[in-house]
Image (cartoon, grey):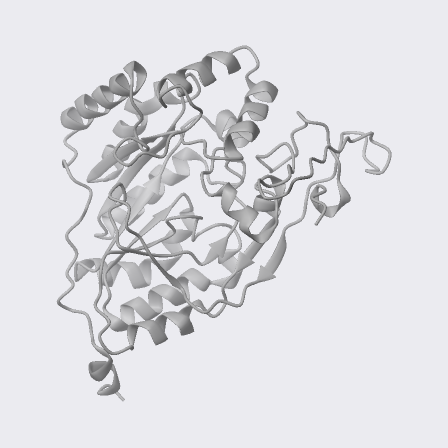
């Protein structure tokens, strides 16, 4: 497959497209070919540059919906991802390289060619009714956001929550999307039974930075308001100050933590930016386009925090890094969290005793 920019739009290396985070559509790591396309303004029909890219929805035929996790860095055993790819367009997204497994680009393809799992609820029900199934910590949205824009129409995430509610299976959600508020009618009763929690990721409170860093996400203030709405409904909320990027948004750590606490978040943590595989060169292109004056400094600090590399996936350090900057960031988080009164652990102890077995489900009919 030749990976040209979607919808036949071509662009130069540092041209930003409105509403999209990546500046290019590079070949994935499994493709030996290197393709560079250049926008000459001839075919766009617009004087201001390429037209906005449209999103293509690809229906995926899945055999399973639950993925097992054995990483000690992650506080859950199972995960469900209703979508592959994400319209939010966060340039730093660590999930971008997964598009390579589908012979697609981790660049603009990841933001514009979204794979959906419309049979997710059916597959989940089949899994939960299997003899011998035992509930474990389960997270919705560990890879890509379950409340990205497509969810407002497709409602796949909501269908998953409906099944989990039916079985009284405990779960957590990770999202940047304010659309999670749509499902309060499901989440609030579950939270009252200690069956769910939500983590809201807030990267920046600066809207001008948000527009280029994560273009199709809600504004930081909207996410803080979402925390308030959820917490007032009795849902335990963790604030994720993530990712923290040296000399880009790390100076906001304390203000993000304070805003989250005021809104009602009970726990908080942060994650240092992760740049695996194709993410690093795309992020560096983004830096050159938007922050050329500090691009070298940003990458220098990141490498100092990753043992001299752009990224190291070592358990125990991949979320926070090592070295002087990483240690200082961790100390800032600890001091601020303590002063604000956050709990020490965001791994909420949900109640697994309420799970209904397959026999109990059958008894309902």
**284 w.r.t. 109: above or below:** above
Left or right: residue 86 versus residue 104 is left
Q: Is residue 91 visible?
A: no
Q: Position of residue 52 (x, y in %)?
A: 69, 41
Q: Is residue 338 visible?
A: yes
Q: Quadrant of residue 318?
A: top left
Name the quarter where the C terminus is drawn.
Answer: bottom left
Q: Residue at x 15, y 24 (%)?
A: 339
* Viewer-nearest residue: 49 or 34: 34
Q: Residue at x 44, y 20 (%)?
A: 248
Q: Position of residue 231 (x, y in %)?
A: 24, 47
* Viewer-nearest residue: 174 or 205: 174
Q: Position of residue 353 (x, y in %)?
A: 13, 67
Q: Residue at x 76, y 29 (%)?
A: 48
* Viewer-nearest residue: 93 or 221: 93
Q: Position of residue 180 (x, y in %)?
A: 38, 52
Which residue is most to the right? 42
**226 w.r.t. 12: above or below:** below
Q: Quadrant of residue 137?
A: bottom left
**273 w.r.t. 218: above or below:** above
Left or right: residue 245 versus residue 254 is right
Left or right: residue 267 versus residue 99 is left
Q: Quadrant of residue 58?
A: bottom right
């Amino acid at each position: 497959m030749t990976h040209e920019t979607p919808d036949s739009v071509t662009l130069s290396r540092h041209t930003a497209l409105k509403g999209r985070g990546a500046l290019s559509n590079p070949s994935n790591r499994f493709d030996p070919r290197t393709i560079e396309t250049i926008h000459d303004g001839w075919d766009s029909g617009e004087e201001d540059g390429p037209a906005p890219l449209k999103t293509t929805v690809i229906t995926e035929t899945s055999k399973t919906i639950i993925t097992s996790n054995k990483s000690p860095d992650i506080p859950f055993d199972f995960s469900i991802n209703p979508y592959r790819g994400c319209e939010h367009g966060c340039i730093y997204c660590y999930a971008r390289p997964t598009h390579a497994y589908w012979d697609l680009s981790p660049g603009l393809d990841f933001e514009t060619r979204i794979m959906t799992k419309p049979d997710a609820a059916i597959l989940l029900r089949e899994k939960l009714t299997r003899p011998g199934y035992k509930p474990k910590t389960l997270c919705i949205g560990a890879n890509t956001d379950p409340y990205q824009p497509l969810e407002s129409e497709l409602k796949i995430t909501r269908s998953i929550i409906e099944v989990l509610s039916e079985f009284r299976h405990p779960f957590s959600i990770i999202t940047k999307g304010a659309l999670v508020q749509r499902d309060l009618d499901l989440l609030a009763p579950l939270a009252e039974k200690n069956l769910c929690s939500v983590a809201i990721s807030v990267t920046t409170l600066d809207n001008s930075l948000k527009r280029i860093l994560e273009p199709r996400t809600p504004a930081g203030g909207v996410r803080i308001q979402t925390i308030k709405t959820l917490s007032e409904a009795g849902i335990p909320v963790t604030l994720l100050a993530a990712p923290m990027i040296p000399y880009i948004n790390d100076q906001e750590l304390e203000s993000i933590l304070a805003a989250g606490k005021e809104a009602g978040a009970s726990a908080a943590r942060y994650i240092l930016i992760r740049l695996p595989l194709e993410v690093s060169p795309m992020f560096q292109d983004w830096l050159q386009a938007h922050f050329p004056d500090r691009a070298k400094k940003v990458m220098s600090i990141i490498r100092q925090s990753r043992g001299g590399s752009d990224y190291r996936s070592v358990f125990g350090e991949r979320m926070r890094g090592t070295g002087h900057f990483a240690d200082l960031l961790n100390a800032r988080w600890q001091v601020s969290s303590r002063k604000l009164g956050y709990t020490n652990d965001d791994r909420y102890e949900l109640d697994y005793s309420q799970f209904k077995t397959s026999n109990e489900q059958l008894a309902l009919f």
